[in-house]
Image (cartoon, rainbow, N blue to C red):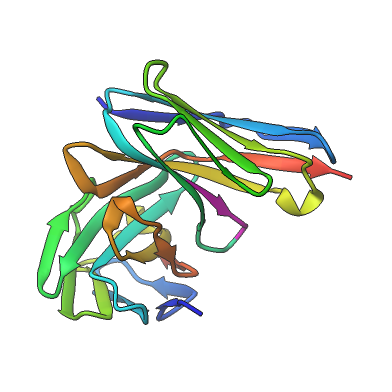
Amino acid sequence: DVKVTQSSRYLVKRTGEKVFLECVQDMDHENMFWYRQDPGLGLRLIYFSYDVKMKEKGDIPEGYSVSREKKERFSLILESASTNQTSMYLCASSLLAAKDEQFFGPGTRLTVL
Amino acid sequence: SQKIEQNSEALNIQEGKTATLTCNYTNYSPAYLQWYRQDPGRGPVFLLLIRENEKEKRKERLKVTFDTTLKQSLFHITASQPADSATYLCALAALYNFNKFYFGSGTKLNVKP
């Protein structure tokens, strides 16, 4: 059974902290994505990666960075967490990007105090 | 600017009826359109993909239509069941960038027994 896992379901951090969100997929997919989901705004793409060490900005990359050192792992980094980054963060992977379904992880609900 | 609109009001229907959800878009030339189901506290799950040159796609009780003239996709669930209650998201990938998906904010469907 295909699987995308995220390191935490719930996370509480303080303003200014550096935050790491980890995502691992076991499907050997080239493409991996990080989204945030907020009420009324839907899912918004933060970053995606189409290969190891390759990344591309999505619609809202400000305040975030990513790392993909291995094919199965895609990390989202909040350099200095702020309260407006309180959100649900969803990781996804797919084989053929838009031509194919995306498999989502369960999400990480991050609260920044 | 680009926009994807889904009805933000919940759709309430009786069990056994057909549910019809709408996804309208502006300033897009989507090559692919996908529909996802999302249950509370979980990541979206892929349902159907339709290409710009396809008018209709079916899968069991699900049907998706794609009208590039009207800039609209309709998602139908026939013989709806209470277990179909969830939020349904549409997602578009543009012709000019297959890697990026843009999601609507979703419509909540409530199927009453």
Residue lying at the far right of the rendered structure = B113
Question: Is residue B49 visible to the viewer in this orientation of the structure?
Answer: yes
**Residue B108 on image: x %, y %:** 63, 41
Image check: A35 left or right of B38?
left
Indicate the quadrant containing the C terminus of chain A: top left, top right, bottom left or bottom right: bottom left
Q: Please report the bounds of the magenta region as a residue range.
A: B35-40
Q: In the rendered image, which quarter is residue B29 located in?
A: top left
**Which residue sits at x=37%, y=64%?**
A92
**Which residue sits at x=45%, y=69%?**
A105
Q: Is residue A5 magenta?
A: no
Question: Is residue A81 visible to the viewer in this orientation of the structure?
Answer: no
Identify whether B87 is placed above or below A67: above
The residue nearer to you, when weighing A95 against A108, is: A95
Question: Magenta region's main secondary structure?
Answer: strand
Q: In the rendered image, which quarter is residue A74 located in?
A: bottom left
Identify whether A9 is placed above or below B55: below
**Residue A42 on image: x %, y %:** 44, 44
The residue nearer to you, when weighing A9 against B87, is: B87
Residue lying at the far top of the rendered structure = B69
